[in-house]
């Protein structure tokens, strides 16, 4: 009973503090992503690739170059969104009343063909949905300052973080175990975020090119939505494909555009989501698909879309941590794909 009360209290605490935790998660996401991209830039630099960094000065110079390139990459994506995607999103938002009327006409057409009268209350209210999404984005925008503050302090503190861990008043064994857990989470998180960002970007760009060739309106918006929703496992990919396909069905009088859109998006998602993604992330994630789905629903109920966006990184941290303690290894075993989890004694 005490455990249940503690669990419910924790859920309530996470829900009531979402305005504080969600900006912190976004800042952590950007911090990990920038560091992951910087690590990739370092790997392709001659200094690191050929092991010719003979001095601390030259190593620091290349570190700074990699970080500057990483910041420039992320800033370039943000500029692209502000100059290209955002205007199209606003245009699509203002077109929702027309889309709603088209949706009603389309539902009436289906009713006549099928012979079953459709309940008008079951038809989604697109303007209202768009307003809710806009309000959520506006709320996130107001937290931008807090995200930036978190991000700045994370970069200031990151060089001294390991020193603080070593300085903690812990036994040698506990200190090594704590360092192993943090290093494992850090390494796996960077690999996952970089790989997932690369795959999501490739999916979004490929979808944009395909939809542009097909001639579907707002191809840039759909490509950007595909990029974002691919961070959400399973449900994100389905929803990302369903939105432009539904749009094509509602807007166009002929079925060809919707058919070509379906073929293109399903093919792209199959290639990147079912073939490339498992191969690239297979060594990073060893977690059950069912556990990921349950975790997705859980965090979605607490923090909404933001919780779904961060559900896999949170589950990864729980998996790595619980694997290192005898009393919680059963949790890691249940979360794993095959029951094989990191040995808790490997860091002794």
Image (cartoon, rainbow, N blue to C red):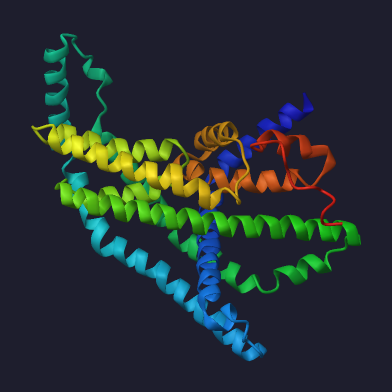
Instruction: Please give left or right for residue 39 compared with residue 68 in the image.
Output: right
Q: Is residue 237 above or below residue 60?
A: above
Question: Which corner quadrant holds the N terminus?
Answer: top right
Q: Is residue 10 shown to the viewer in this render?
A: yes
Most foreground residue, 216 or 54: 54
Report the quarter where the C terminus lies. bottom right
In this view, the residue in front, 2 or 320, is 320
Identify the residue at image location x=56%, y=50%.
Answer: 21
In which image quadrant can residue 249 be found? top left
The relative height of residue 97 versus residue 105 in the rendered view (above or below) is below
Residue at position x 60%, y 41% in the image: 14
Residue 165 at what x, y percent from top left?
Answer: 78, 65
Residue at image x 36%, y 64%? 77
Q: Is residue 241 left or right of residue 36?
A: left
Examine the rendered structure and indicate whether residue 232 appears above or below residue 57: above
Residue 132: give x, y in percent of width and height: 33, 39
Residue 152 in the image, given as x and y percentages of width and height:
54, 70
Pick the front one: 269 or 65: 269
Asked where in the image residue 318 lies, by quadrant, the reply is top right
């Amino acid at each position: 009973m005490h455990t249940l009360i503690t669990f419910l209290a924790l859920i309530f605490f996470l829900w009531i503090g979402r305005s504080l935790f969600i900006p912190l998660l976004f800042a952590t996401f950007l911090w990990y992503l920038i560091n992951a991209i910087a690590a990739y830039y370092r790997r392709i630099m001659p200094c690191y690739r050929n092991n010719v960094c003979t001095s601390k000065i030259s190593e620091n110079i290349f570190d700074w170059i990699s970080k500057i390139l990483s910041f420039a990459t992320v800033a370039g994506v943000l500029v692209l969104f502000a100059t290209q995607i955002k205007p199209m999103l606003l245009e699509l938002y203002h077109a929702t009343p027309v889309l709603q009327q088209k949706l009603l006409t389309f539902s009436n057409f289906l009713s006549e063909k099928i012979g079953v009268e459709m309940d008008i209350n079951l038809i989604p209210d697109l303007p209202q949905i768009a307003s809710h999404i806009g309000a959520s984005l506006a709320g996130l925008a107001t937290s931008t300052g807090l995200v930036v503050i978190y991000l700045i302090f994370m970069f200031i503190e990151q060089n001294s973080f390991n020193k603080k861990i070593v300085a903690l008043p812990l036994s040698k064994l506990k200190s090594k175990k704590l360092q192993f857990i943090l290093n494992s989470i850090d390494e796996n998180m960077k690999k996952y975020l970089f790989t997932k960002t690369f795959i999501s970007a490739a999916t979004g760009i490929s979808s944009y090119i395909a939809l542009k060739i097909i001639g579907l309106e707002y191809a840039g918006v759909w490509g950007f939505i595909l990029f974002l929703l691919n961070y959400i496992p399973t449900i994100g990919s389905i929803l990302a494909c369903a939105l432009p396909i539904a749009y094509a069905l509602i807007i166009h009088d002929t079925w060809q555009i919707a058919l070509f859109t379906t073929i293109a998006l399903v093919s792209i998602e199959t290639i990147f989501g079912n073939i490339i993604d498992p191969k690239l992330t297979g060594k990073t994630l060893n977690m059950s698909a069912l556990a990921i789905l349950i975790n997705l629903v859980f965090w979605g109920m607490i923090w909404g879309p933001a919780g779904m966006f961060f559900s896999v990184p949170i589950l990864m941290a729980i998996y790595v941590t619980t694997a290192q303690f005898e009393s919680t290894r059963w949790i890691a075993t249940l979360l794993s794909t095959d029951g094989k989890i990191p040995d808790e004694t490997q860091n002794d």
